[in-house]
Every structure is written in C-alpha cells, then in structure tokens.
Image: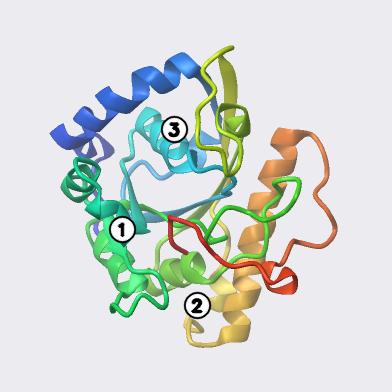
Amino acid sequence: MAADRPAENEKTPIFRLLAGIAVPPMSAIAKFKLTGVENVPGSGAFVLAPNHYSEIDPLVIGVAMWKIGRMPRYLAKASLFEVPVVGALLRASGQVPVERAGSGKRSNPLAAAKQIADQGLAVVIYPEGSLTRDPDLWPMRGKTGAVRTALEQGIPVIPAAHWGTQLVMPRYAKKISVFPRKTIHVRFGEPVDLSAYAGRVHDSVAMAEATDILMTAITELFEQLRGEKAPAERWDPAKHNQKDTGRFEQ
C-alpha cells in the first residue's frame, strides 16, 4: 500500500511552473466547473480514469487536478520526451515515458505506475488507451491497465468525465478555439468497487469484467454531463479494424 502524502506538498516548484504556463491561458479560454471533488482523495495514491476524446484532454485534467490540489502523473508516449523543452518538463515533473507496442523497445507501464503509486501520488490512466473512436464521442471499450494498476497496488480507482473540451479542441483537430470563452465540466465519481476482483489480476476474464465496470462508471458520469443516454453497445475498435494511436497509455 502506498504511503499517504499531504496534497499541499505536491505543488512543487516544477508544478508551479507548469501551472503558471498552462492555467492562465486555459482559464482565459474556458471556465472550469468541477463537481464530485469530494470523491478525490486528499492524500495518498490513486488511479484517476477519465474519458478521452481530444488531444487536449491531459491538459484539461491537469488543470482540474491543479485546482483540487493533487498533481497528476501520466504514462505518456515516449516520443513526447524527445520534443525539446516539452521532454525536459515531462521528466522534471515525474511523467513516465512508455514505449508503444511494436516499437522494439521494452516498456512496462504497470511497473511505471507502481513507482508512482509507491510515492503516494496520483496516476492518470486513460482506460480507453487512445481517443475514443465512437462517432459521437461516447467512451469506447476499455483496456485493463487502470483496474490492474489499482488492484495490484491496493489503491482506489476514481472514474472521471469531462464535457466541453471538444469546443476548445475537437477530436483530431490541430488548433485550439480561443473565442468565445467555453465552459468545461469535469465530474469526479466515487471510487469504483473492485473488491470482487482482488487477487485476480492474472485472470483475463476477471480483468475484462472489472474494466467494463469502470467504463460503465465513466459513461454514467458522462451521461450526467451531457444530459443524454449513451448507446446501448459500447464502441469496439476491434470490430471496426481501427488501430490504437493515442499518446497516453492504458
């Protein structure tokens, strides 16, 4: 079990620098409305599992977490660390490079997540693994990384959903829409009860079931924000021969 750490100690100089760079422009572009904040642990390790439909999602979640007082760590695509300045900031803030499957380089996302959890920190894992392929932006089929990390480390997994981000940067877009100012809603849910799956992380069927429970929780939060019901069947990229090209890992 990871050790607790007071949240105020997480706002280190590097995160204050990043916040100084990111928060003012994001606040100018969009008003953030956070709900369910009481569900986010004030200290100690946990997995945050948000929906994912825009390239700017990590920044949106990062700003939301800054406002709460918990500093997020991401399992990020290794190539991002090769970008000048960006790579240095990612390394300095404790983000973790993860190689994509088939890259020829060895990488262990769960081991990386364990290192973060051991320090009593928050790790953001997008269970969809990439931007959703659902035509209407609903959460698609999830992967097992988020629930496996939570179960292996004995830490909570907090579902989250946001809506309004697509107005700032639509899926697959390359530019940010600045005017008019948007509103981004971020809702944090109660920890997902995975107790029935404790000790079963090597059972693929159990992990698939646990992941479906998590995706249902995320979808329900998303339904509340959108004010409408999700499709009865969750989008499955495998059924549509779609490849995973996301930047932030499962």
**Label whose residue precedes the other's in the sequence (2 or 1):** 1
| Residue lying at 70% horizontally and 34% vertically, measured from the top left | 225
Residue 11: image x %, image y %? 22, 34
Which of labels 2 and 1 is toward the front? 1
Q: Which mark is residue 16?
A: none
Task: Give the quadrant of residue 133.
Answer: bottom right
Residue 27: image x %, image y %? 43, 18
Q: Which residue is mark 2?
A: 198
| Residue lying at 82% horizontally and 62% vertically, measured from the top left | 233
Q: How many marks?
A: 3
* Distance from Cα at disc 2 to Cα at disc 3: 30 Å
Q: Which residue is mark 3?
A: 64
Which of labels 3 and 1 is toward the front? 1
Task: Give the quadrant of residue 21.
Answer: top left
* Distance from Cα at disc 2 to Cα at disc 1: 34 Å
The residue closer to the viewer here, 135 or 127, is 135
Residues at circles 3 and 1 in contact by the CB criterion of under 8 Å: no
- Along the horizontal axis of the image, is 229 left or right of 37? right
The residue closer to the viewer here, 47 or 77, is 77
Q: Which residue is mark 1?
A: 79
In what element is the residue under mark 3? helix
* Distance from Cα at disc 3 to Cα at disc 1: 25 Å
Q: Amino acid at mark 1?
A: Ser
